[in-house]
Image (cartoon, rainbow, N blue to C red):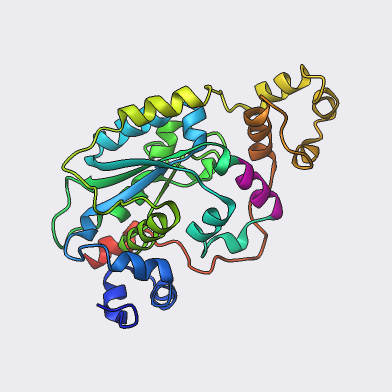
Amino acid sequence: MTYSDVPGAVVAELTRSREKVAHYLVDPYFRAGLRRVDLSTVAGLTFVVLKPDAVAGRRLEPALEALRDNDFIVAGAWTFRFTPLLTREVWRYQFNIASWDRAAVVDLLLPSTDSLLLVLRDRTWTPGAQPAASRLSALKGSADPARRRPDDLRSRLNGPTTLFNFLHTADEPADVVRELGLLELATGLSILDSLTGEADPSALVARLHDEVPAHDLDRERSWTRLAARPDYAGIARRRAWRELLEVPPAAGALWDVLSVLTAEIDCNVPGLEPLVPTIGAAMWEVSA
């Protein structure tokens, strides 16, 4: 298959979204990924990115345990660092609704340290069954704590705010293809050539924990710690959280600042819709 002859039928096999078919036919990262995957087995693969808040909040090991409990095997593990540009390319079709405050906070949060990328195989998958990506997406739960179910992975990990949600996954196979293609291009990692029967990410987890001190990610305790610092005492006394966006965080204050900001900001612009709506797992279950 050449770069210019991706048929719509191939894209349509990997998504239940008509909007996504139209966009991905001309998406350079999807096209790059399509040349790298085995279309006969890609539905059995997915991935999770455990983000910097999962590192600081010490949710890496609980997340790995939750994945094992739900029959996902780690087939490959890497670390990489988000940049503001990579953030916008990963969420190219959703970030159009982000508020300016959300963009500013995400640009502090995601590049703050490395994230952990895990490519996963679904033990339960067989050809024709629900794809691994949609099954994991359904288990993941909403980024918004108010919309989570008790048995969601994000509920199990106890993410305190919409932006401290710890993990990112693909919605369906088309997103696995696109985002792994993007990550290979952006990071130089050879992801799809390096998959194994089962990989052990424990050394990477230990390194990330060594590099980032643990934090409680709690807004009120963060305000208290900021109030005890001369450089933040006035802001904390006034609870003037917007002033925290106006200057870079001082040394040692990043996670306190982020814990306050992620609890205060409005994430999305009212009235806007993402370019490509989220595809729920039920759309694959009905069609299976």
Between 101 and 247, which is closer to the camera in this rendering? Answer: 247
Q: Identify the main secondary structure in magenta.
A: helix
User: Magenta stretch?
Assistant: 100-108
Q: Position of residue 37 (x, y in %)?
A: 24, 62
Residue 31 lies within the magenta run: no
State how many labels appear: 0
Between 117 and 258, which is closer to the camera in this rendering? Answer: 117
Q: Is residue 162 visible?
A: no
The residue furthest top is: 228
Does residue 236 appear to the left or right of 283 in the view shown?
Answer: right
Q: Is residue 187 above or below residue 285?
A: above
- Which quadrant, please, contains the C terminus? bottom left
Q: Position of residue 99 (x, y in %)?
A: 67, 55
The residue furthest front is: 188
Between 54 and 264, which is closer to the camera in this rendering? Answer: 54
Between 171 and 248, which is closer to the camera in this rendering? Answer: 248
Which image quadrant for residue 197?
top left
Does residue 3 appear to the left or right of 73 in the view shown?
Answer: right
Q: Position of residue 36 (x, y in %)?
A: 27, 63
Q: Is residue 106 visible?
A: yes
Which image quadrant for residue 207?
top left
Residue in the image at 23% along x and 59% along y: 43
Residue 105 lies within the magenta run: yes
Q: Is residue 34 above or below residue 201?
A: below
Residue in the image at 23% along x and 37% along y: 199
Does residue 266 appear to the left or right of 239 in the view shown?
Answer: left
Residue in the image at 72% along x and 19% along y: 224
Does residue 62 appear to the left or right of 249 in the view shown?
Answer: left
The residue furthest left is: 126
- Which quadrant, please, contains the N terminus? bottom left
Q: Position of residue 250 (x, y in %)?
A: 73, 29
Residue in the image at 30% along x and 68% along y: 34
